[in-house]
Amino acid sequence: MPYVTTWERRAEMKGQEKGIALGKREGIIEEKTEIAKRLLSEGISLDIICKTTGLSRPEVESLQAEEPVH
């Protein structure tokens, strides 16, 4: 079994924490995107979608070009 120093253990833990944080951010963005797609399919205005999801207008406009959510 290889010897693991304290600083290596700390570095590994820090990497895991960063990975978890990144995953959470990606999940939040994915959820906002799905909500925006559903709102678009219901005919809600871009301004309201931007305000409620926090997505930018160009982000929401790019979603309009995609397939509608069913």
Image (spheres, rainbow, N blue to C red):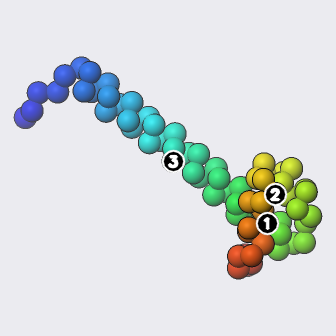
Where, by quadrant of the figure, is residue 69 drawn? bottom right
Work out whether residue 54 can be spotted. Answer: yes
Q: Quadrant of residue 39?
A: bottom right
Q: Left or right: where does residue 63 sit relative to residue 5?
A: right
Q: Residue at coordinates 90% horizontally, 72% vertically from top-left?
A: 43
Mark 1 residue element: helix
Please name the residue that numbered disc 2 is placed on: 57
Residues packed near mark 3 inside 10 Å, few (<14), some (14 to 19) or many (20 plus): few
Which of the two labelled residues, at mark 3 and mark 1, occupies the earlier sequence position?
Answer: 3
Q: What type is the residue that disc 1 sits on? A: Glu
Q: Amino acid at mark 2?
A: Arg
Alpha carbon distance from label 3 to label 1: 25 Å
From this view, report whether residue 10 is shown above or below residue 47: above
Residue 22 is labelled as: none
CA distance separating discs 3 and 2: 24 Å
Residue wearing tag 1 = 61
Q: Residues within 10 Å of mark 1 (few under 14, many from 20)?
A: some
Residue occupying the point 90% across, 56% down:
48
Circle 2 crowding by C-alpha within 10 Å: few under 14, some 14–19, many from 20: some
> Furthest-left residue in view?
1
**Of the numbered discs in the image, which one, if any, rests on residue 23?**
3
Element under label 2? helix
